[in-house]
Amino acid sequence: MIWLVGNKGMLGTELALLFEIQGLPHVGSDRDVDILDPKALADFASGKGITWIVNCAAYTAVDKAEDELDLARSLNATGPENLGRLATSIGARIIHISTDYVFDGSGLRPYLESDPVAPLGAYGFTKAEGEARLVAVCPAAVIVRTAWLYGEHGPNFVYSMLRLMGQKEELGVVADQWGSPTWTADLTRALLAIMQAASLPSVLTSGIYHFTNAGATTWHEFAAEIEMLGREFGVLDKPCHVKAIATADYPTKTRRPAYSVLSKEKIEKTFGIKPPGWKESLRAFAETGFGPQVKK
Ligand SMILES: NC(=O)c1ccc[n+]([C@@H]2O[C@H](COP(=O)([O-])OP(=O)(O)OC[C@H]3O[C@@H](n4cnc5c(N)ncnc54)[C@H](OP(=O)(O)O)[C@@H]3O)[C@@H](O)[C@H]2O)c1
């Protein structure tokens, strides 16, 4: 039995649907079973024969985390530790989701799983701490770092851009931060492939893996692609000029890595998972009508 923790979030909702489609036995929880309450977690797991815990619950408000460090730290560090301790005690395996923001972005090549973490802000700091605290109590844990997530089940950059582009004739978007947009539908398929492979006793699968869509781009180019697809698929009825701006021209509460491209070599070698290119996946998302949140 799979236990999907955080099943009402953007990634969790998508993963629950995939388990449903695949006919995989699963149970889900979100705020109703607080990851900060070890007794509530143990009570929920009791008698269900849990073999996998997939943790999609987190504190994900990157800028707000600077003002709510204690809360972010509880959810992103204590939460995974509680789940890891429970997984160890009931003999279940756990997959936990982490982020490219554990890196400072000063790298010149895609980040490897073995590169040292050096988060720039509170969110990245708490996620990095969560990784370490999880592994300390559950060495068999699998941690999947991802980045720039979008999908139909939660607020994200694609929806923000389409909304703003519908209202404005010009939009400034930062062109000096590099990363890899990632469709939740691709990430959920990768998570499932890991769980299926990791069930084979011969495969040593614990540790950290990177998964994003393939290729690297900037927020500016990502936005320009969204604008083009928005017009092509009838979500935008007029063009919006996407202007390249510098990070310095768009101040945010937290500093973000300038380059947070993640190497996918390890996940490909270990599990044979080959992520689709980011443009290909963005187009596939557009072909679904960008999900139900978008009004045509
Ligand atoms: N979104 C991205 O761009 C991105 C990029 C890289 C990595 N990630 C990682 O990917 C994972 C999934 O992200 P996401 O965007 O799907 O997150 P999300 O939409 O914010 O979902 C997180 C879920 O956890 C729930 N939650 C909050 N506090 C909880 C608690 N105490 N107990 C149980 N559940 C609780 C949230 O409920 P409420 O909504 O009521 O708070 C929400 O349903 C996270 O680990 C995140 O760090 C995300």
Image (cartoon, rainbow, N blue to C red):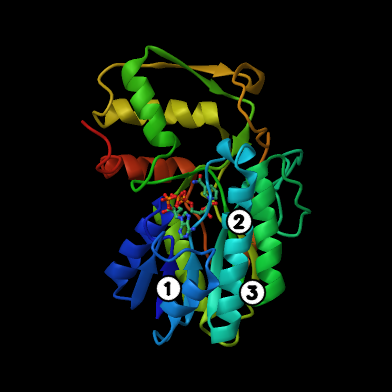
Query: What is the x, y in percent for residue 253?
Result: 62, 29
**Which residue is the extreme one toward the left?**
296
Q: How many marks?
A: 3
> Does the rendering let one see residue 14?
yes
Residue placed most toward the observer, 280 or 203: 203
Judged by depth in the image, the label closer to the viewer, 1 or 2, is 2
> Does the rendering let one see residue 271?
no
For residue 206, which numbered disc appears in the image?
A: 3
Judged by depth in the image, the label closer to the viewer, 2 or 3, is 2
For image coordinates 37% across by 56% down, the residue present is 8
Q: Relative to residue 83, is residue 138 drawn left or right?
A: right
Q: Amino acid at mark 1?
A: Trp
For image coordinates 56% across by 64% down, the residue present is 96
For residue 3, which numbered disc appears in the image?
A: 1
The numbered mark, 1 or 2, whose residue comes first in the sequence reads 1
Up the image or down, 103 lies above or below 185; here it is above
Q: Residues within 10 Å of mark 3 (few under 14, many from 20)?
A: some
**Mark 1 to mark 3: distance in Å?**
18 Å
**Which residue is the extreme one toward the right?**
116
Judged by depth in the image, the label closer to the viewer, 1 or 3, is 1
Q: Is mark 1 in CB contact (under 8 Å) with mark 3?
A: no
Q: Residues within 10 Å of mark 2 (few under 14, many from 20)?
A: some
Label 2 residue near ligand 1, CB within 8 Å? yes
Q: Amino acid at mark 3?
A: Ser
